[in-house]
Image (cartoon, grey):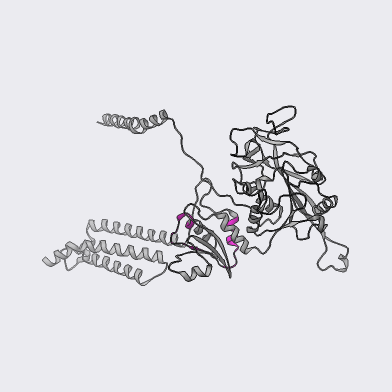
């Protein structure tokens, strides 16, 4: 009898250990996803211990222990508690199982800081074979890993891996990695250096998506830059466009100079032509060739500066109803770009257009810009302003003496950039005409596009990478290429400042309310209720 009492004293621990093992087994099964020996062994052991505990709850009547046990009120209450605990364990196991099988994330940040842009998501989903990002570093920065995890969630063909070059020197040599932090992209048998990451220079969505697009795109757009009239060159000199040209090449564009006076016509493979601030007038034959190119659906980007020969461009601009003001736009606000003076116009207001759709409330600036005007409404020509100055700007007729003169100057807001489209009708012959179709054609409606910007300096070396100047230029080129599946520039997302700025008086009042007044009112209310119920 003493032995039985001793055993009964410790039987309650059998229940606790059994439930614990059962919970651990179910959790392990939910995480692993199948019946592994470890999880199955824990579940069976837990069930056996619970069964032994039930058998030992028989009371003093050893001839009918089960009947004595189940007849107790405490047993019924304990059984209800056991079933409730078992149900809790099962529900918890199911939640863990579903959580490992179906990954769902909800980004509640205002600017969707932790969500990829729709273009990047579609880019990863369209991958037709595995693509992998290799990061040769010992440190896994959280912001980089979170971004790469976001990419991996979009499709099974995207993956990434961190590699320590010291423990795996062979793989580092295979990619040519020489320093910690180097990131490479591998797609099939092709490899590409992406960037070098540091804590202060993390991976960006734009960099990764541009590289993926360059690897996977089977089409390249060709941009020709007109030369021979003092236009900005593609060289690395001051005032050149080498930074812009390199960025376009990184986005799978082909960039080449064009001496139209020698070729006599624009090449057939040209997706667009850029005329960047010519200092002398174009030849009449060149103007004719450009007009013919636009009639065929060709696209054109024209940028001017303070010394540009506008008269040489007028025959082209007049066909679209566009004029360029001779005066220089002046920025009269207190906030000016350091080192550039009042002639560098800040722009933070943009038109509703694919080129500028993500630019609102972000700055770009344009030194010595000229205003763009719609001087004549042309049928079927659609115009959309891109760059809008503030009311604190004006077009100055005398840059040597900056002072607003109502008689000779023009008050802002002004337009510094405009996008234009015009439909064209092309006819393409049928692939296999029948006798009844020999004289018929398949008519397709397309459009020719043009962008006119009243400044060129913003895209030159040194200024191209400032603020979103480069985005304005690259997005204009991308839109003009008419490859609608080509990614436009993806600007980095910024977290808005939501801090509450309070005066000393407001902070003191808040402290009194939260620490003294509100608790005192609660204490008084509680005392009053106690007094009434007494």
- Say which of 71 and 432 sits in front: 432
Query: Where's residue 92, x and y in %?
Result: 38, 58
Which stretch is magenta? 119-145
For the question of whether residue 210 can be seen, the reply is: yes
- Say which of 257 and 76 sits in front: 257
Q: Is residue 126 left or right of residue 200?
A: right
Q: How many marks?
A: 0
Image quadrant in which the N terminus is located: bottom left
Q: Identify the residue at horizontal 62%, vertical 64% (top origin).
A: 216
Q: Is residue 135 left or right of residue 481?
A: left
Q: Is residue 424 left or right of residue 485?
A: right
Q: Is residue 324 left or right of residue 110?
A: right
Query: Where's residue 281, x and y in %?
Result: 81, 46
- Say which of 521 and 276 sits in front: 276
Image quadrant in which the C terminus is located: top left
Query: Where's residue 313, x and y in %?
Result: 79, 45
Look at the image and say whether residue 135 sits in the magenta stretch.
Answer: yes
- Asked where in the image residue 64 lies, by quadrant, the reply is bottom left
For the question of whether residue 1 can be seen, the reply is: no
Q: Is residue 253 above or below residue 317?
A: below
Query: Where's residue 331, x and y in %?
Result: 64, 35
Look at the image and say whether residue 394 sits in the magenta stretch.
Answer: no
- Say which of 528 and 225 sits in front: 225
* Residue at the far front in the pictured view: 237
Q: Identify the residue at horizontal 26%, vertical 29% (top origin).
A: 531
């Amino acid at each position: 009898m003493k032995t039985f009492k001793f055993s009964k004293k410790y039987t309650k621990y059998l229940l606790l250990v059994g439930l614990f093992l059962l919970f651990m087994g179910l959790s392990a099964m939910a995480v692993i996803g199948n019946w592994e020996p470890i999880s199955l062994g824990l579940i069976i052991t837990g069930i056996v211990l619970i069964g032994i505990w039930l058998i030992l709850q028989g009371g003093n009547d050893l001839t009918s222990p089960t009947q004595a046990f189940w007849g107790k009120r405490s047993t019924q209450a304990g059984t209800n508690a056991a079933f409730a605990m078992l149900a809790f364990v099962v529900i918890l196991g199911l939640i863990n199982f579903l959580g490992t099988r179906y990954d769902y994330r909800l980004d509640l940040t205002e600017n969707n800081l932790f969500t990829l842009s729709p273009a990047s998501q579609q880019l990863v989903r369209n991958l037709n074979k595995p693509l992998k990002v290799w990061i040769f570093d010992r440190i896994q920065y959280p912001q980089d890993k979170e971004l790469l995890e976001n990419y991996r969630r979009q499709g099974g063909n995207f993956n990434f891996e961190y590699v320590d070059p010291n423990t795996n020197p062979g793989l580092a040599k295979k990619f040519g990695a020489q320093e910690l932090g180097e990131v490479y992209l591998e797609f099939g048998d092709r490899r590409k250096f992406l960037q070098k990451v540091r804590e202060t220079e993390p991976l960006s969505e734009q960099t990764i998506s541009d590289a993926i697009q360059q690897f996977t795109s089977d089409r390249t757009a060709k941009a020709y830059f007109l030369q021979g009239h003092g236009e900005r060159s593609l060289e690395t000199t001051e005032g050149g466009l080498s930074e812009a040209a390199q960025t376009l090449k990184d986005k799978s564009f082909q960039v080449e100079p064009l001496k139209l006076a020698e070729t006599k016509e624009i090449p057939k493979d040209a997706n667009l032509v850029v005329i960047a601030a010519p200092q002398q007038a174009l030849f009449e034959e060149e103007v004719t060739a450009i007009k013919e190119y636009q009639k065929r659906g060709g696209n054109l980007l024209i940028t001017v500066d303070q010394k540009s020969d506008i008269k040489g461009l007028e025959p082209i601009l007049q066909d679209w109803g566009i004029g360029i003001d001779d005066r220089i736009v002046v920025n009269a606000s207190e906030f000016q770009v350091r080192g550039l003076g009042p002639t560098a116009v800040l722009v933070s207001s943009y038109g509703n257009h694919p080129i500028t759709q993500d630019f609102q409330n972000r700055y770009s600036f344009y030194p010595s810009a000229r205003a763009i005007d719609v001087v004549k409404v042309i049928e079927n020509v659609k115009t959309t302003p891109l760059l809008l100055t503030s009311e604190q700007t004006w077009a100055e007729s005398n840059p040597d003496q900056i002072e607003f003169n109502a008689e000779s100057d023009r008050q802002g807001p002004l337009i510094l950039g405009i996008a234009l489209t015009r439909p064209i009708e092309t006819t393409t012959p049928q692939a296999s005409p029948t006798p009844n179709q020999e004289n018929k054609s398949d008519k397709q409606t397309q459009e020719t596009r043009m962008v006119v910007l009243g400044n060129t300096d913003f895209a030159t070396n040194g200024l191209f990478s400032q603020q979103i100047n480069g985005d304005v230029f690259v997005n204009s080129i991308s839109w003009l290429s008419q490859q609608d599946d080509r990614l436009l520039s993806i600007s980095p997302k910024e977290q808005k400042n939501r801090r509450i700025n309070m005066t000393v008086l407001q902070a003191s009042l808040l402290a009194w309310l939260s620490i003294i007044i509100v608790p005192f009112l609660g204490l008084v209310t509680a005392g009053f209720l106690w007094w009434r119920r007494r």
